[in-house]
Structures are given as C-alpha cells and as structure tokens.
Image: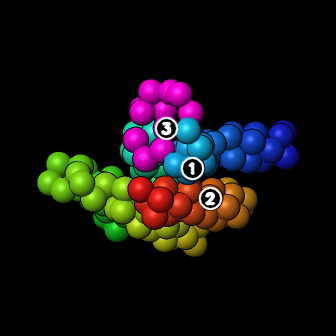
Amino acid sequence: MNAERTTLAYLFGFAGTLPFLWGAVTQFVQIPLSANLLGAQLQLTYGIVIFAYMSGTHWNFAARYQQGESPVAYIFAVLPALLLFAVMVFVPQHLHLVLMIEFPMLLLVDLYFAHAGVTPAWWMNLRLWLSSIVTLSLLITYIAS
C-alpha cells in the first residue's frame, strides 16, 4: 500500500509538471491554439493554481506539527500564498518572475516541515524534482518571451 501511494504521488506529481513543460515548448513552436493554452499565459494561470495547492499541503503539515501550536509553522504555511497574492494585486506584470522565485522558496518551507517530521519520507525527493522542472520551465519561458 505504501509503495502504491508513493508511486501514485510520483505519477501525479510528474503529470502535474506537463502544463509547465508545455508552456515552455510552445514558446518555440507555433501551435494554432488559444493564447490561454500556450506559453507564459498557460504557465501563469496553472502556476497560480498549483501554488495555491502547495500552500494547502503546507497548511496540512502545520496542523500536523507535533510541537504544539506553532505560529512559525502556520506562518510558513501561509506566507508564500500571501506573497503571491500581493504580487498579483500590486505588481501583476512581475508575476512570472515571482513564480520563478517562489516555487524554489516552497522547497524551503517543505524542508522546514520535513525536519519537523510531518512529511512523508519520500516528500523532499519528489518536491526537489518537481520544483526543478517547474522552475526551469518557467525560466525558459521567461527568457524566451
């Protein structure tokens, strides 16, 4: 059961990087689709959704934190999403750049919760791979646009 759960996490995790990869590829290939399904626009829309999802996983980890009610755990869980929200409201023209910076930042939050012992054993390995793919895809698109 545990191996099956880990396999599914890797399978769905890597599948979740496909829109980021697709966005990077479509910067270089002309495809007759709506702009919302291509390049930077796709990455930004999907990136916001995935970023919010990751904040939800961090909230779960904060709730599982065994050191009592830890304000630091909850702050780490919500701060990245609040920062992204502020960028979307006040400087949306920099959203792509901020996503490129904030996805690796999420790894630091993951590391905090991994050291607290509230993540699965395989979590950091998977998150390192996924964050690397996402960040590289965002960087390629950013440079190409």
Compared to residue 33, the image places residue 44 above or below, namely below
- What range is drawn magenta here? 31-41
142 or 120: nearer the eye?
A: 142
Q: What residue would you read off at disc 1?
A: 28
Q: Which residue is mark 2?
A: 133
Of mark 3 and mark 2, the one earlier in the sequence is: 3
As drawn, is 109 to the left or to the right of 133? left
Q: Residues within 10 Å of mark 3 (few under 14, many from 20)?
A: many
**Residue pointed to by mark 3:** 38
Closer to the camera in the image, 49 or 143 = 143
Residue 3 location (% of width, % of height): 85, 46
Which residue corresponds to the image point at 53% horizontal and 61% vertical from the top-left? 140
- Asked which quadrant contains residue 19, the reply is top right
Q: Amino acid at mark 1?
A: Phe
Frontmost of labels 3 and 1 is: 1
Residue 144 among those drawn in magenta: no
**Spatial CA span between label 3 and label 1:** 10 Å
